[in-house]
Image (cartoon, rainbow, N blue to C red):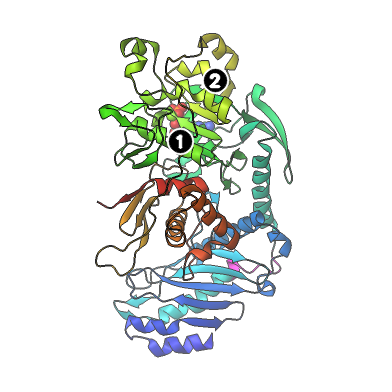
């Protein structure tokens, strides 16, 4: 620590690049500081530092990280504690550009596995961005000294040192995450694909703010779908089990249908205490399916839904740079099945109508043989009965799906009612089709070129995330903006790194794209996110398998 202090005094006022001398390890009284990377100027991405604490220094009981799950929840909790401490103590602006900023990449309402905070039996480590202060291009050493010797120790004390402090909230954070996993693991036994506990709060603060809506109406299960579940920490809870099969969510406009579906979409993740969706869980493989005009499609067999296209284009191995609403939605389903998805989540708001339904009058006008599309309506039961894939479908405008539904939930003034019996009386016959049914799941093993090449005038190929879900991948681009269950820029970057990893280690993909990606993800699950980067950083977050594959499926050359 004294060495850092005198180094700083020595370089005060010198050119910003002289900061590079600070790289190294420093012993503070209560922790160890490592300066891993020093930025080139005050406008560049901030410097990277990391804090190490021994078990004696952090004082956390080892039983808090017994397994991967609790470890992730604990790391998340500590990251949030550091984040809060930074907000409280760090002044921020101390010169030009980013000067004075400190950041940790833990945020959002979900608990994701990250590499911002890592704990094991040997040490606790937190990784921060730390913008070294400068005035223009000269070093502001006194400002830096305040950051290192006043602010940083306070942040560490408040976020990472727990000797003789109450651990009640931390314990609760971990236990709630364990309960969510336990609940998700019980879905199968309940013959359910999702569960929404009574008293959950589903609506969000706004379309761009994922915090709970204040004064929202709490969820209450319809009697018919209500069941009790026992959780390891909370004990017995009750709520709505969404059964396997075809479930419709119906109701008037603005009555909370999409809000329920969106909560189910996010139910693949664990949520932090106070979110309102702590006990809203969905089976891990549930995939939101939507129309995605203009997306890239690469060698997908969409023939179960779309026979031939104008110009006699075959659809058994369909590729396009510019998909339509229906072809994109068909491809999204087939790709989800390829990833072993067991539950489709569909909202009419974001679907292609001609992919969803074809009504009798239209069939009289345009006979089946002229229409290449077999709508989902005609195949959704088969998907369940033959393939075991359930669907939860929001539909307010068309009654066609009533005939194929197992359950119908009506949202009325944000309250859920089971209207299955009434719907059955109204539904009429199951829709029939004269069309030949092309079987699902005949996937050809395919390869995608994942090699990453630098742009002209760049020395190295870069992986960069823009606006959370846009990935620049060397010369290529991946638009994940419609892949709605991808939540965090850290996940997007991890996906880019994983693809590059596969491109490098297994360019031939001898066992096919899907198996190659699965192996890479498994390896990261086992060895940690750090294996993806040659330097130490803390901004990566674990993606789900489906979103990783979704990225490979959308890879396209930069225009
Ligand atoms: P729908 O899909 O049925 O048209 P939405 O789910 O989009 O309706 O919800 C309409 C509005 O109602 C949204 O602004 C949403 O935040 C709000 N909302 C949804 N559920 C609740 C609730 N339980 N309490 C209060 N407001 C809610
Ligand atoms: Mg809606």
Q: How many marks?
A: 2
Is residue 370 positioned above or below 102 on the image? above
Q: Is residue 61 left or right of residue 247?
A: right
Q: Quadrant of ligand 2?
A: top left
Q: Is residue 394 visible?
A: yes
Question: Residue at image x 55%, y 74%?
Answer: 153
The quarter of the picture where residue 20 lies is bottom left
Which is more N-terminal, label 1 or label 2? 1
Q: Secondary structure at mark 2?
A: loop
> Which residue in the structure is indicated by mark 1?
334
How busy is the neighbourhood of tag 1: few (under 14 within 10 Å), some, or many (20 plus)? many
In the rendered image, residue 164 lying in the magenta stretch gets the answer: yes
Relative horizontal placement of residue 266, taking residue 457 as reference (left or right): right
Q: What's the residue at 41%, 82% (across, down)? A: 142
Quick check: 263 above or below 375? Answer: below
Location of the N terminus by quadrant is bottom right
Local SS, label 1:
helix
Q: In the figure, 414 relative to 475: above or below?
A: above
Give the magenta part as a residue range. Answer: 157-165
Image position, residue 182 (x, y; %): 68, 44
Specify the principal SS of the magenta part: loop
Q: Closer to the camera, 313 or 257?
A: 313
């Amino acid at each position: 620590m004294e060495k850092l202090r005198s180094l700083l005094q020595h370089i005060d006022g010198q050119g910003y690049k002289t900061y590079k001398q600070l790289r190294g390890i420093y012993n503070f009284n209560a922790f160890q500081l490592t300066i891993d990377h020093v930025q080139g100027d005050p406008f560049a991405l901030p410097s990277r530092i990391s804090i190490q604490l021994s078990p004696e220094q952090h004082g956390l009981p080892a039983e808090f990280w017994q397994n991967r799950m609790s470890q992730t929840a604990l790391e998340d909790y500590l990251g949030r504690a550091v984040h809060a401490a930074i907000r409280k103590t760090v002044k921020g602006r101390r010169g030009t550009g980013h000067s004075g900023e400190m950041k940790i990449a833990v945020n959002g309402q979900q608990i994701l596995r990250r590499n911002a905070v890592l704990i094991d039996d040997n040490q606790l480590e937190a990784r921060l961005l730390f913008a070294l202060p400068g005035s223009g291009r000269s070093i502001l050493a006194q400002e830096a000294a305040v950051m290192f010797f006043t602010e940083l120790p306070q942040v560490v004390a408040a976020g990472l040192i727990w000797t003789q402090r109450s651990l009640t909230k931390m314990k609760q954070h971990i236990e709630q995450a364990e309960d969510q996993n336990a609940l998700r693991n019980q879905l199968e036994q309940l013959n359910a694909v999702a569960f929404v506990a009574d008293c959950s709060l589903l609506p969000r603060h706004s379309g761009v703010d994922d915090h709970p809506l204040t004064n929202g109406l709490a969820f209450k299960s319809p009697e018919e779908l209500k069941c009790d579940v026992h959780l390891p920490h909370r004990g017995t809870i009750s709520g709505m089990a969404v059964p396997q099969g075809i479930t419709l969510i119906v109701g008037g406009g603005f009555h909370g249908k999409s809000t329920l579906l969106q909560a189910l979409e996010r139910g693949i993740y664990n949520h932090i205490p106070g979110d309102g969706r702590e006990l809203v869980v969905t089976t891990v493989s549930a995939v939101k399916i939507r129309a995605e005009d203009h997306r890239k499609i690469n060698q997908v067999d969409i023939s179960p839904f779309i026979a031939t296209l104008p110009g006699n284009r075959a659809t058994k191995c369909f590729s396009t740079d510019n998909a339509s609403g229906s072809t994109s939605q068909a491809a999204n389903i087939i790709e989800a099945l390829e990833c072993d998805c067991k539950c489709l989540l569909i909202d009419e708001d974001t679907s292609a109508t001609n992919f969803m339904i074809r009504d009798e009058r239209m069939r009289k006008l345009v006979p089946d043989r002229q229409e290449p599309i077999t709508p989902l309506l005609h195949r959704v039961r088969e998907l369940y009965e033959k393939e075991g894939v359930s669907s939860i479908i929001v539909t307010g405008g068309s009654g066609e799906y009533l005939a194929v539904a197992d359950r119908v939930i009506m949202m009325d003034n944000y309250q859920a009612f089971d209207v299955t019996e009434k719907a059955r009386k109204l539904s009429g016959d199951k829709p029939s089709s004269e069309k030949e049914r092309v079987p699902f799941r005949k996937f050809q093993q395919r390869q995608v070129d994942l090699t990453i090449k630098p742009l002209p005038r760049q020395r190295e190929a870069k992986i960069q995330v823009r606006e959370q879900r846009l990935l620049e991948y060397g010369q290529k681009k991946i638009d994940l903006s419609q892949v709605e269950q991808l939540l965090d820029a850290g996940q997007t970057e991890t996906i880019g790194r994983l693809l590059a990893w596969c491109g490098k280690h297994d360019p031939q993909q001898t066992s096919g794209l899907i198996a190659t990606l699965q192996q890479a993800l498994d390896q990261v699950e086992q060895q940690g996110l750090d294996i993806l980067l040659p330097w130490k950083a803390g901004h990566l977050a674990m993606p789900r398998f489906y979103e990783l594959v979704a990225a490979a499926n959308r890879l396209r050359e930069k225009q």
